[in-house]
Image (tube, rainbow, N blue to C red):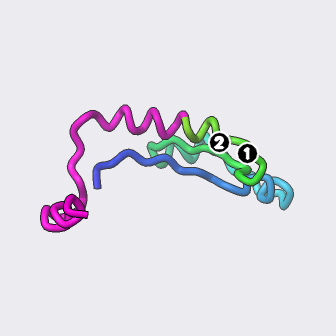
Amino acid sequence: VGLPVVLALNMTDVADSRGTKIDAELLAKRLDAPVVKLVAHKGRGLAELKSALDNAAKSAGAKRESPCSPEFQAEVKQI
């Protein structure tokens, strides 16, 4: 689609408690996208996620094409 991507890994506390190790840095390199580890119900990682989303939105530039058809966009504008 050509839009920026941020991968939010939630429930990383559960993964850690089960011995599952996730190398977020390596995953980010392989996906060529930021990866943010979260424990959302405790609020952990939310500031980092917001920052990553802000950075991704800024890197997208001012001009982005919608993946939706022109007909769909016209219908949405009428709502």
Could you tell whether 65 is left or right of 59 in the image? left
Q: Which x, y percent locates residue 16?
A: 81, 53
The amino acid type of the residue labelled 2 equals Leu
Other-residue count near label 2 (Cα within 10 Å), few / some / many at <14 / 14–19 / ≥20: some
> Quick check: 73 left or right of 14?
left
Instruction: Identify the image quadrant of the N terminus.
Output: bottom left
Tag of residue 43: 1
- Look at the image and say whether residue 56 sits in the magenta stretch: yes
**Residue occupied by mark 2:** 46
Name the residue type under label 1.
Gly
Q: Identify the residue at horizontal 77%, vertical 58% (top origin).
A: 15
Q: Position of residue 77 (x, y in %)?
A: 21, 58
Q: Residue furthest front?
A: 79
Helix, strand, or loop for circle 1?
A: loop
> Which residues are drawn in magenta?
51-79
Q: Residue at x 54, y 34 (%)?
A: 51
Quarter of the image for the C terminus: give it: bottom left
Within 10 angstroms of label 1, few (less than 14), some, or many (20 or more) residues?
few
Residue 36 located within the stretch drawn in magenta:
no
| Nearer to us in this view, 33 or 10 | 10
Marks 2 and 1: in contact by CB < 8 Å?
Answer: yes
